[in-house]
Amino acid sequence: MIPDSSLRRLLRSAHEQPAPVSTAGFRASVWARIDARRHTPQPWWAPLREHFTGVAPVALACVVVVLAAGAGGWAAKVRVADSREAMVERYVSSIDPQLRGKAHVAHLTR
């Protein structure tokens, strides 16, 4: 445990803040940059760009997720249709091999 006197000395030394180093002309250079930005012509879409800068990555991620889900659903639908057709053909051929061609033609004409 730290004795009270050394703790007080430590706290007093920690309380003293170093003096900030002032850079000559810092304030003037900041105001010069602000004035230069005010006087440069901005395109009409600049406020929109600044507004949507943070929104664009989130919107892009949402679009990618929706497109991926749609593509996955479409691929599953196609795969289920192909498997169903194969199951129908196997079932019909297991019952009567002669009906296989007729069932295939009937399935295509629906």
Image (tube, rainbow, N blue to C red):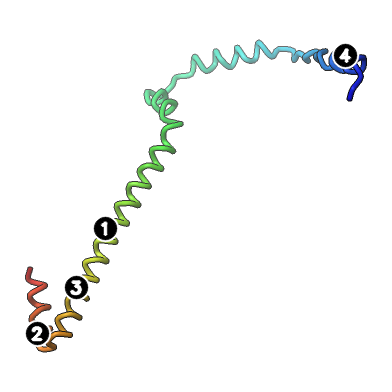
- Residue type highlighted by circle 4: Arg
Q: Is residue 20 left or right of residue 63?
A: right
Foreground disc of the pair 1, 3:
3
Type of amino acid under label 3: Glu
- Tag of residue 99: 2
For residue 98, which quarter of the picture? Answer: bottom left
Identify whether 96 is placed above or below 42.
below
For marks 1 and 3, the one nearer the N-term is: 1
* Residue 74, numbered circle: 1
Q: Which of pointers 2 and 3 lies earlier in the amino acid sequence?
A: 3
Find residue 9 and report its horizontal and vertical position in percent: 90, 15
Q: Residue at x 43, y 21 (%)?
A: 42
**Residue at which label 3 appears:** 85
Asked if residue 36 is positioned above or below residue 64 in the image, the reply reads above
2 and 1 marks in contact (CB < 8 Å) = no
Is label 2 in contact with label 4 (beta carbons under 8 Å)?
A: no
